[in-house]
Image (cartoon, helix red, strand yellow):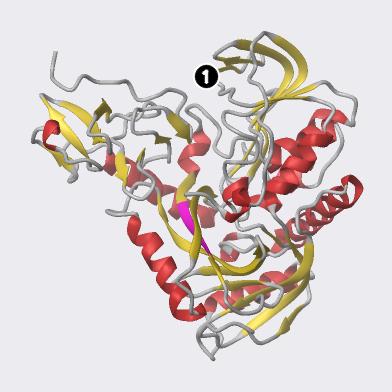
Amino acid sequence: MRSIWKAAAQCNPRAPLTRDLTVDVAIVGGGITGLMCAHALAYDGLKVAVLEARRIGEGSTGNSTGNLYALVGERPRRIERSHAETVLNARAEAVDRIEALVRALDIDCGWVRCPWVVYTHSTQPTKALLQAEDLARAGRLHARPTSVPLPVSAGLAFAVENQAQFNPLRFVHGLAASLPCEIYEGTPVTALDDERCRVHTPAGIVDARYVVLASHAPKGMLALHGEMEPYREYGAAARLAREALPPGIFWSLDEPYRSIRGYSYDNANHVVVVGESHWVGRIDDTRVCYAELEAFVRNHFGTDAIAYRWSAQNYRAADGLPYVGRLHPDSRVLVATGFGADGLTYGAVSAHMLSDVIAERPNPMLRLLDPSRLPHARALPGIMAEGVAVLKQFARDIPWIDRGDPTSLAPGEAKVFDRSGEKIAAFRNDRGELEMVSAVCTHMQCIVRWNTAERTWDCPCHGSRFEPGGRVIEGPAWHDLPARPATPE
């Protein structure tokens, strides 16, 4: 499975780090946040190294919607009205900043300005629509009533002009090619010494004046993880037999939530649909998410030509605003997380903010998005509910645990087994080989659950994800799931 952005973007691999290194700033994560931050810092004259566990841009950035907008698309009700103008201005400036880079560096990424349209299925104003309109007014954005030129059930709608779309992966590849700094791929960070500002990797140690954690979910056991909800969202792109969709970002405010846009690639027009969001590790069969999304494409756009499928993870802050800045007061470790489904725009906002922290420049967003801030009273019920849900995952008799024999698994099948009191995650691959690892997440000891669509072990507490053989993919976990023998020793 791969996104249409990955299909349309080719980039030569970069070498991993193989030696110790000393820099001004070590950036962990090679997505839009990390690379835009690297760009700002490098041109401030600082020596920067970017450490990417896999390939640059191929995590959350390369599995996103490719949409950029000033208005907050997710959970507008959670943002205090008094903060709206500051937040929306920062987001609009971030979109302008991306465009300036596209123009200055001549990046071929399909950049286009377009309207951002939100709509409901009802012909009567809904609570969600009124909240979105109120936030737009508070942020001094002009929202005009409009119609939705798509074959979907749409009632009321409004549009905010001059938003943007692009191929996010082609953008970060173009940006990376221009950077006067060192970029290392295939270089996972295995430990972080906060006090020394030292980053450990498999083949080298990086000492820095500052460390920027731009890996979407910061690694380790942090209080922030208790204030965020990990979600997965699914995407599909299908070839259209007809002309291209009208320019625009089209966002449904009613269930089932959908983000719709067009994209032309490989001499064909495509419809790109994203949706089916759910808490990581808490549904029985994730293949249903793709099935629902593809049925929507077939039923509304008349095509079975599903060419690309993908999914991505996002972390939603309890009060609707990201956490950006020093990990704790006076720390030289900086973090950017909690973007929700607004990661591209907030990534650009965060990159600018973090470069201002390091350069000791004032920024009006730093206090508002401070990771050490106290949650607003409106966010407390969400934080408490998340805490209760996590505690439930620690329960001993989790329903999906099997007490049978792992060797009974058929090819392609996976289960969590209780073997003499130890929880074992077992998967039989398509070659008939049995892969067995500990089912206890290395982050905070929750029991992982099988993701049928992605073929991964996912933690339902804080969103860490692992390959069938135990290698950590993403999330706050530092370490792999330990291997276990097929038969007890």
- Residue 435 visible within the image: yes
Q: Magenta stretch: dominant SS?
A: strand
Q: Which residues are magenta?
A: 232-237
Residue nearer the viewer, 85 or 396:
396
**Which residue matches tag 1?**
190
Asked whether 377 or 486 is in front, the reply is 486
Badge 1: few (under 14), some or many (20 or more) residues near its Cα, within 10 Å? Answer: some
- Give the quadrant of the C terminus: top left
Amino acid on which the number 1 mark rests in the picture: Thr
The residue at the point 27 percent across, 34 percent down is: 431
Q: Residue at x 52, y 83 (%)?
A: 152
The quarter of the picture where residue 392 lies is top left
| Residue 53, above or below 398 | above
- Residue 9 position within the rendered picture, expressed as x and y whole percent measured from the top left: 67, 47
Element at badge 1? Answer: loop
Residue 297, compared with residue 3, is above or below; it is below
Image x and y of residue 345, in percent: 70, 53
Compared to 31, does 445 lie above or below? above
Residue at the front extreme of this rendering: 267
Query: Position of 431 compared to 73: left or right?
Result: left
Residue at (89% x, 31% y) in the render: 43
In the figure, is residue 440 to the left or right of 114? left
